[in-house]
Image (spheres, grey):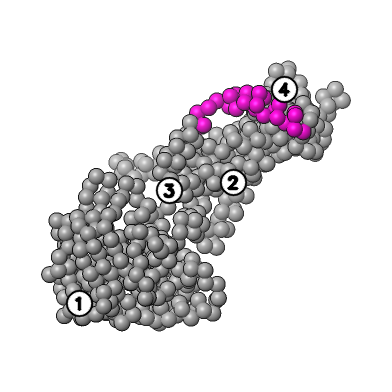
Amino acid sequence: MIFSRETIAKNVFLFCTLASTVTISSILLFMIALGLPLFQESSFLSIWTGPWDPYQGLYGIRPMISGTLWIALPATALSLPLSLGTSFVITSLGGRELRRMLGALVRFMTGIPTVIYGFVGIFLLMPLIREGFGGAGMCVLAAVIVLAILISPTMILFFSDSLLSVDPGDVQAAKALGADRAQRLLYIIMPKALNGMISGFILALGRALGDTLISLMLAGNAIRAPRGFLEPARTLTAHIALVNAADFNSLEFRSIFTCGIALYLFTTTAVIAVRFIGRKKSVMQ
Amino acid sequence: MLIKTKDKIIVNGVSFFYGRNQVLDNIHASFAEGAITAITGPSGQGKSTLLGLFNCMWDEIPGARCTGTIRIRLGDMWVSPLKKDIPMPLLRRKVAMIFQEPNPLPMSIAGNMAFPLKLAGVRDKSFIEEKVQKALAQAFLWEEVKDRLEKSALDLSGGQKQRLCIARALVLEPEVLLCDEPTSSLDKKAAGIIEDFLVSLKAKCTLLVVSHYMDQMRRIADKVMLLQDQGLSQI
């Protein structure tokens, strides 16, 4: 039996799609299976909402969930306007030289190892926070600022690619109708680039939620839910890294899988929510 | 037939360069008010580039350079776009342009029509509606789209899209309309409607039309100019 090229290509892509779906689902099932001993020992609710105190037999990850949200969400929120502005300058508002220079700088930033950002935070930012606001300097604020800078190149590159992919005919039409650069950007380019920009935002948010090293180096790792930006915090990823050395059969070790499930759910929720907003916006246009 | 009228645009010693590549060399010409001037010539000679000089569409092209003088009479005032003595958005509202490929924006028909007015800062809804209806009627399009103004402009036929684009350019009542091969992507019937429409606009504005079709130029133009070997001459 002879298969057409189209059928072969279709089946290869179908296989890839199924493989991705199975892999992603397997990861979730794997985490649930390995975390099962903890779910059997503690109540489901207490794991998600209770405190962490292994000596008392309490393995709640609420402080880590709280720490993750306190760091990842403000960092993404801080990075968004920064990245939007930079991508606007790179794609349309800046002069030729400035665009070239900024583009090169952003691409360079993507290659800098995370640990370097962490060192910069420790040696440059933390003393400033210590002197300006008091305390040890290892706090949510330090992690938020450095994480915002760390994720911004991802957002900028995605935003810039999306903005540049808009049909030049539409931009030219708007220009001929008297739209200045800012109006073209606001009314023509941005609405058309929205879907690509949403993808960039999701990716950056995922990176912020999943980053380990910055929060490990800068946030202080205290196991209690922060109540302000100057308090220390421990994120889910930092917790996984710190508890990783515990005995495999201990419930303490098993808690890292509940952290994994929480991260998985956060990312999935963020993707669905942002896609939903984006689709609603597209329909409105 | 050449109509004797006042000059609307005067071009004096204009040369244009894309980097080191010279496209136009020492162009001299004048374009009469209330007339249709057709510009023709072989492909790649810079006809579209010349047209784009009048509303400064080239100003953001890296490495592009223009020397010489272009003067356009807007109302009672002469402006020199190359000297940028008029804000560019204002110039483009008065010297409107339509392109070879119809380019409705990805929004509704009404949205497309209201867009230039909104850019110009007009906020009065009833005024916008009145202007939109008038411009669509002028483009013989009102009857065809009045029941689907909120539908996407991208669903119109090729000829309707081009008429929408001309109507959209007219909504700001420009004094000059630059048409870059406005019928080349249309069939004969749709092209005929656009030609009639352009002729009907002579009373309101000055038209410069780039075209490859000699029979079309004979039908609609008062004056035909040939752009060849970087120079412009009347034929």
- Circle 1 is placed at which residue position? B222
Q: CA distance from mark 1 to mark 2?
A: 54 Å
Kind of element beneath mark 2: helix
Q: Element at badge 4?
A: helix
Q: Residue at x 56, y 53 (%)?
A: A278
Seen at 49% across and 42% down, the residue is A158
Which residue matches tag 2? A81
Mark 4 vs mark 2, foreground winner is 2
Residue A226 in the image, given as x and y percentages of width and height: 78, 35
Mark number, residue A164: 3
Image height check: is A64 above or below A163? above
Determine which quarter of the picture holds residue A262.
Answer: top right
Q: Position of residue A225 (x, y in %)?
A: 79, 35
> Viewer-proximal residue, A28 or B59?
B59
Q: Amino acid at mark 2?
A: Pro
Which residue shows up at 43% across the image and 62% down it? B87
Q: Confirm whether circles 3 and 1 share one chain.
A: no
Q: Quadrant of residue B37?
A: bottom left
What is the residue that sits farthest to the right in this orientation? A56
**x and y percentages locating residue A33 in the rendered image:** 68, 30
Mark 4 surroundings: few (<14), some (14-19) or many (≥20) residues within 10 A: some
Q: CA distance from mark 3 to mark 2?
A: 18 Å
Q: Tell which subunit mark 4 falls on.
A: A
- SS at mark 3 in the image: helix
The question of residue A131 being in magenta is answered with yes
According to the image, label 4 marks what residue?
Answer: A243
**Same subunit under labels 1 and 2?**
no
